[in-house]
Every structure is written in C-alpha cells, then in structure tokens.
Image: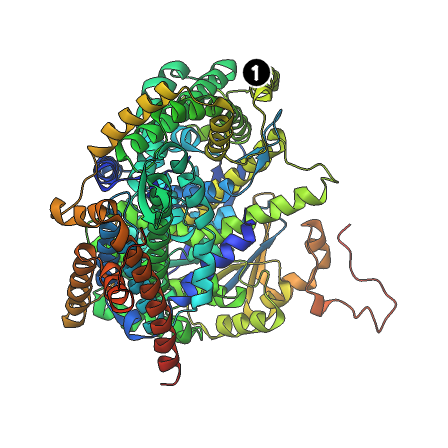
Amino acid sequence: MATIEGSMLDFRQLDLLAAKDTAIHRLDARAKVLVVLLFIITVVSFGRYELSAMVPFFVFPVVLVTLADLPAGFIVRKVALVIPFAAAIGIFNPLFDQELRFFIGSFGISGGWLSCVSIVIRATLTVTAAFVLVAVTGFTAVCGALGRLGMPQVLVVQLLFMQRYLFVLADDAANASRARELRAFGSRGMGIGPFAAMTGHLLLKSWERAERIHMAMLARGFQGEFHLQRTGTFGYRELFFVGGWLVVFMILRFINIPLLIGDGVTHLFLAQATIP
Amino acid sequence: MHMADALVSPAVGGAMWAVSAGAVAYSSSKLRAEVDDRRVPLMGVMGAFLFAAQMINFSIPGTGSSGHLGGGILLAILLGPHAALLAITGVLIVQALFFADGGLLALGCNIFNMGVIPAFLVYPLLYKRLAGQDPSGTRLTFAIVVSALVTLQLGPFAVVLETLFSGLSALPFTTFLLMMQPVHLAIGLVEGVVTAAIISFVYLARPELMHVARGTAAALVFPTRNLLLAFLCAAILTGGIVSLVASKEPDGLEWAITKVTGSAEVQAPDNKLHKLLATIQEQVAVLPDYTFKKPVASEQPVSATVENKGGTSLAGIVGVGITLVLLIVGGALLKRGRASL
Amino acid sequence: MSHHIVAADRLSFSYPDGTSALRSVSFTIHHGESVAVIGANGAGKSTLLQQLNGYLIPTSGQVRIGDFPVTAKTLHDVRRTVGMVFQDPDDQLFMPTVFDDVAFGPLNLGVTPEDVESRVSAALQAVGAGHLAAKPPYRLSCGEKKRVAIATVLAMDPAILVMDEPTAGLDPFSRREVIKLLKEFSHTRIITSHDLDMVAEVCNRVIVMHAGEIWADGTTEEIFADAGLLASCRLEPPLSMQNCVVCSRRRPVSAD
C-alpha cells in the first residue's frame, strides 16, 4: 500500500497537470465531465463476455492524453496499480464458469476467462478515463462542473473543503505516524491502543482547526452562502467535443471494429479461416 | 469493502446511484436548512480527517493482517447522520477519482454501503436506541461496538447482493456470502473497539463534541477500566474466531477471495451441487444483463464468438491485435507530432 | 464612521468553564494608531482580539468600534470595519484558489462581481501577490500565504486591521516584506506579537498584558525601556535594544 506521502504526491501531480494550457484544458469543464460520464456508461453497458469490442474504446484516453500533452508514462503507471485488484476480483470467474465459449483452433477458452479479462479491461478503461478527466480538468473544476450539472451545492462545498485540507491533515497524519515509528523500535505494526490515541489526537486537532476556520469565515462576513465565481461558456467547441465523442462511442458500441479488421485481414491472407 | 466497477452491471449501478443520490440530496437539503454554519468547515475538515486516518494502518490482534478505520459510525456520532453521509460521500468520490479505489459506476453502491447504511440505518435505528439520551461508559462502548458490528455485516452483505444482481462475477451467491460475512465479523468488532476508543479519547478532552449528548452539564467520564474490559473480550473473541482461519491478507474482501480459491481446490465440489449452483447463478445472472439501446445489436458480438467459433474467433483475435497496434502507433505519432509543434 | 475609535470599557470575559481570561480591560485606540498588544502566552491577547470582531461577546463591560458597541446585532458592520488576520494562514485560506479567498470577503459584503475583480487585484497588488491569483493555497510558501491572508482582509476595505502574530514562523526575507507592508498601511493597526523587534519598528504604542489585565499602556520607547516591567510580565526588551552580547561581557536582561 502506498505511503501517505506517496499518495498525496500523486494527488498533487494530477492537479498540477490540470494547470496546463492546451485546447483540451481550455474546454469548459462540464463538457469534459459529460463526455467521461458517457464513456463510462457506454463501457459498462457491454455484456460479460465481450472483449474485442471494448478495446477500441482506448482511443478516447489515448487521444486525450496526446492532445492534452499529458505524461503517458505517469498515467499508465497509475492505472497499472489498479489492474491487480480488478484481476483479483475477476480471477475466480474461471473457476465457476467453465463452459467453453471461444475456440482458437481446438483450444477452448471458458466463459470464465472471457469474463475475467472483460472485467480487467473494463476496469482499466474506466479508471483511465477518471484519471484523464482530473488531469485535464482539475479537481476544483470537476466539482464546479458537477455542481452546475446538478450536484447539491452542499456536496460541492464539502468536496472543495475536503480537498483543501486534505494536504494539511495528511501532513499531520504523516508526522504523527513518523513520530510514532521513530519510537516503536522494531514492533512491526501499530496496535489498536496507540492507533486510537493517535487518531484521537488528529481528530481533535482537526476539529479545532475547523473551529478556527469558522472564526476566519465569520471574520470575513460569512453568513451561510457560498459564492463560487466560476464563469465558463458552453460554446460550439464544447458541443462539438461532446457530440463528436458521443457519435464515436455509439459507433464503437454497436460495431465491433476489431472483428471487422480481423475479418478483413484473415480473408485477405488465409484461404480457410478455421483450422478444424 | 469497496465495490469495484468491474463487478457492477449498469442496472445495479444505476439503481444504487439513484438511491445514493437521493439520500445525498435529502441530506443536503436538511443541512442547508440548518442554522449552525459551523458545519461547513467542520464537515470538510472531518472528511479530510477521515481520508487521512484511513491511510494509517494498524495491526489487528490475533491475526497477521492490518486494517484501517471505516469511520461511518464515528462520523455519525460526531457530526450527525446528514453531515456524516456527505463527509463519507466526499471521501469516496475523491478515492474513486484520484486513487482508483472502487470506480465511478460502483460509487453509488459504495456510498450506500459505507455511508447510507451506517448514517441512515444503523445510527438512528440501532445506535441511538442502544446509547440513549445520555450515553456514558459501558453503555456507550456497547452501543458503538454493536453498531459497528451490524454496519460491517450489512455493508458486505449489500456488496454480495449487488454482485449477485449484477451477474458479472461467476462466484456463486452462497460461497461469496460465507466468505464475506464471517471475516467482516472480526473486522466489525475491531472497528467497534477502535471507534469506541477514539470516542472515549475525544470525550475526555472535549466532552461537548458528542452530537448526541447535548445539554448535559456534567462532564461524562469514560472509565478506561470498562474500555479495557471490552477490549479484552474483543481480543479473546477475535483471537478465537480468527485464529481458526488466520491469514496474511490485508483486506477482508481479498482474504475472502483467497479463501475461495483455496477452498475451491480442496473441496472437490459435489458435481450435482456445483452444477445446480452454476445453473441457478446462470439463470439469475442472465436476467439483469441489461444493455442500453438495442439488445439485438449487443448480442451480435456474443453470438458471433459463440456460434461462428472457428473463423470469427481467429478474426477476433487478429482484429484486436491490429487495433491495439494501431492505437499505440497512432498515439505515438500524435505525440511526436505535437512535440514538434 | 467617526474616527474609527476602538475602545474597550472595563471589558471582562470568562470562558464557559469558568476560567477568567480578561479582567476589566480598558483602553482607547484612535484612528491611524499602530498599537502592539504584547504579553506572555496565556495573558489573554488572543481572547482580547476575538472580542474586537465580535467572535466572543464580553461577560461584562463593552467594546466599541467607532460609533457602535459590539453586539450580536452589529456584528455585520463590525466585521466590515475590523479586518482580522489570524496566526495560521492555513485557517484563513480555505477556498480553492487565492482569487476565491480574496474575493470571499467582498462577495459576502454584497459587492458586485465586477467590483470584486478590481478589489481583488488591488488587494493582491498591495501585498505583492498579484501573480498568485490563480494558485491553490496549498501550493504557496509560508510567506506567500501570510501575505495573501492579509490581502483577503484588505479586500474588504476595513478601517481597522487586527493581526495575530503576523511575523510568526517567517524566514527573514518574508518577515522583512511583512514589516514593510505593515509600515505602509494607513489603517489603524492592532498587532499581537512576540517579535518585539518588529513591534519596535512598526508600532508607536504598546499595551502590555499579564494574566488577563493591562499592566502598562504607553509609547513604544517608554515600555521597552522599562526592563523591570517587561520582566515581571515574562517578557524581555527587543533583542535589538538589549546590550550586544558579543561586544560586552554583560549578560542580557533575563526574565527570571
């Protein structure tokens, strides 16, 4: 499991990427959020045994990564961390679903394996989309966009505050953790007692900080309403972006392009496609 | 206990999204009407606290595994149900977006399992009844531990149900159930003990923080003796149960999975039972396999692989390979093209 | 508002658990004065500051800002007039970007969005942080955070600036920048600090507090010359006013 500092660094990295200035970055956040939502819904709507039809969907993150000048290696590494977990979940499908559904020559592959790989591909696609969304939009803008798309204001504010103080509190937690470690002298894990005490301290510190923040808010005239000034136009570019990707997704959803390509290629080079 | 995108079908995911969205909207409106504007920074900071606290692992006595704080009951006690739900929702959203801890489709399920269940079900219906108006000492510990236990049974049970109705995993219902529930019994116990310890700590320092105990003038003292006793019982119980099935897996769900793999080999399933389970699971799984626009169109690829096994299978593989190559080459070219601009 | 006087009249305050924090504190601060409130930790400085913008209400006695007393009803006006900068800038910068933070105050006061823009840039320019407008607070350095925190208050156009330990934790360069800023302001300034050298540079009047009471109230020169008084309040004269330890063998004034 990543250390606290490690996770927070990644978090900051993604936010830093969002500060770039490319055509994609300049698009209104709502457009990007919408497209990613459509993407995820489409990917997830595939049946359990579908594999080949999902692969072309990688074109979406690939295009975005290149157009937005994102570091591909970084994204790939972050996504790669997720794959083992998806595999762990799908891994017992082959045990229970042994009906052969797919043949390469006389070698049969069970439905279980198909659905397992399908799960992994699905996970990879959705996670990549989420990362890319944040890397081209930034957390704050995503929250703002979600707010304007209907998410309750209370939740938007909650997310923004949480993100703001995450770094501060994670630092506190990391410090406390390190301080304890330095006095632990070899005992491997942290017992429940020390954990409860440490977490209790953190909780109180956090609570008191919240009270001071409240003081600061009152001192600047806060009376309950949050004014988040976010302007953004949903213009032709955005319409084109959303519409264009929607068309692409629909095409890819209902036409299995790899199959078509494969069909074409095999008919070109092989007299007889099947090896009996 | 995070539900992953991979296991959720659009139907189940969508349904749970609707439920969770409804709950969140309800809580939001309740909070807007609330006069106390301290809640804005408090909720945000407590959300950040929960996130940070979940990154710290502690070792569970009696086993080799480590755990982390769930926090549902803790937040419900400190903030009240509505604020707690929103705080937990915030944490889950950030985890889904930045840490790929569960996925965006499954977010609705996760908000329900880890937010709605403790805040809307266990806290009002169970905890408040057990703790009463003026909780202190043993009664409070008891209420917390029991609430945590129940939360961490209902949550995993919900995961099992959601997986079942989604039909994307081939794991039979009963096997999954038998693996999830007992493990989470231990986890629930630990969560309860840890939460009780934290609440007691907070109580000693700042008694006025307890959401439930309002208006009581006297400082409520939390005798450590009771806590130690409760901890001792928990340790014995945990040690006893868990030592029977001890493992080094870091997470209850993963532990369950390993157990399944192990038992599947050892058991040499009774063929009839296995077939029966498989058939049931097949029946149930087929029903919610829901596609959006045209069911006919989506069946084509499946039937293509199943029926035209020979030619199209090979074609399929070749096609996938070529597509991947195209994507990689295309991406590289695009990148090079942009770099030179 | 007439003269923006800050006046405390036999102000006393006790916390709900009974601890007495302020005992019959009285003073009058006139428009444009630059006053330091110094004292040991626990002397009641922060509590006093919190009375000045209405966060805490006196148990007895009164605080007046300009024409009106600080009561629950006048809070809005008080906070418009009295701008408070807290010790930990992280507590004050809670919005997603610096711009949002500086705009927070004016927006709450009902300033129109167009005017908000100009106020924000003016405030950021005043503290030399104009280039930081789009940054999220967690990416700022300590010194930058302090200056932006000051800007968040300046944007509200207060007549009175109250600051709690403005130079605490800053490196020498940032500290010098903050001192320069403070000297430039024409607002009434009320500052608490342990940094007595900064006080010597910035303030012309010093109020010494000890155990919730005011023990002295005079010009900076008078107070800092009285080492005995300072010692009895657990303080020392500013380091720049103590005898040079290197040049002479005499030990510096100790507070024992």
Residue B270: % across, % down: 41, 19
Q: Which residue is mark 1?
A: B237
Q: Name the one closer to the observer, A248 or A127.
A: A248
- Rendered position, C93 above or below C232: below
- Rendered position, B223 above or below C9: above
Q: Is residue C15 left or right of residue C158?
A: right
Q: Chain of mark 1?
A: B
Residue C23: % across, % down: 53, 41
Q: Is residue C109 left or right of residue C229?
A: left
Q: Is residue C254 left or right of residue B7?
A: right
Residue B211 visible, this orientation: no
Q: Amino acid at mark 1?
A: Leu
- Rendered position, B182 above or below C177: above
Q: Circle 1 — which element? A: helix
Q: Name the one closer to the observer, B181 or C231.
A: B181
Q: Name the one closer to the observer, B234 or C66.
A: B234
Q: Quadrant of the C terminus of chain B?
A: bottom left
